[in-house]
Image (spheres, rainbow, N blue to C red):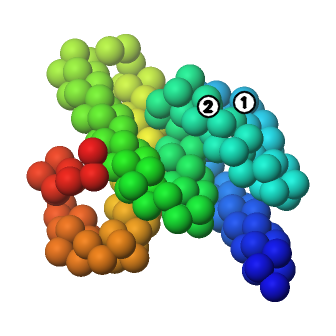
Amino acid sequence: MNVMIAETRRIDLATRLRRISEILDELLPDAEASGAAMHRVTAIALECLDRNVIPQAVFALVDAVRKNPFWMRGYLFLAIIYRAASATQEAVATRQTGTKMCRTVRRFLIAQISRQTIGGAGTRAILSRLLDRMAIRMAMMKRYDDILRHQLALTLVGAGQFEEALLWLTEGDVEHAPMRWQ
């Protein structure tokens, strides 16, 4: 009986991550500098989950996030795997790190936009295209931030940390939310 439950859980996790990946491909195309390499990592992790080799999937994702700390999908997938494995502390820490990285990218983009508009780099058309790309990237980081914060709140609720979960859901500035798990 326990083997059947574990097998169902593994299938659900692999299927769930595959579906999340498809949805993210539609909603938030992975234009994160090294899209092809990160898609390969996603495929490797999903293949490991299909074979029920969860540590290898985690290793592949951790290694990829270490190499590209701005790969938000990696944080999301890692946190989902940790939560499914009942590794709540790791799931929370991964989601917190992901939200911090989203905020870092957004601050960087704001600084770049300010510098470009003040400095007036190049022609108006080039500047307009550059600002459009930065705005799209900022919107993508905001969505990943929202997804990670929502998932973090669900994990905290599952761990009985109700007040902390509410703070993460309602707090606009993640840096002021509690960091008890670190």
The quadrant of the picture occupied by the C terminus is top left
In the rendered image, the vertical position of residue 27 relative to residue 53, given as above or below: below
Q: Residue at x 82, y 75 (%)?
A: 3
How far across and down, in percent of the image, does residue 161 sit?
Answer: 26, 72
Q: Are marks 1 and 2 in contact (CB under 8 Å)?
A: yes
User: Looking at the image, is mark 1 or mark 2 earlier in the sequence?
Assistant: 1
Residue found 16% across the figure and 56% down from its top = 178
Residue at mark 1 to residue at mark 2: CA–CA distance? 9 Å
Q: Quadrant of the N terminus?
A: bottom right
Q: Is residue 120 above or below residue 107?
A: above
Count of marks, rendered view: 2
> What amino acid type is highlighted by mark number 2?
Ala
**Residue reaching furthest left?**
176
Check the image and report above or below for 113 versus 57: above
Q: Position of residue 74 (x, y in %)?
A: 57, 44
Q: Is residue 33 left or right of residue 5?
A: left
Q: Which residue is mark 1?
A: 37
- Look at mark 2 in the image and give the residue it sits on: 64
Residue 163: x and y in percent read: 17, 74
Hey, which quadrant is residue 51 in on the image? Answer: bottom right
Instruction: Say what amino acid the circle numbered 1 marks.
Output: Ala
Mark 2 falls on what kind of element? helix
The numbered mark at residue 19 is: none
Mark 1 closeness class: few <14, some 14–19, many ≥20 residues within 10 Å: few
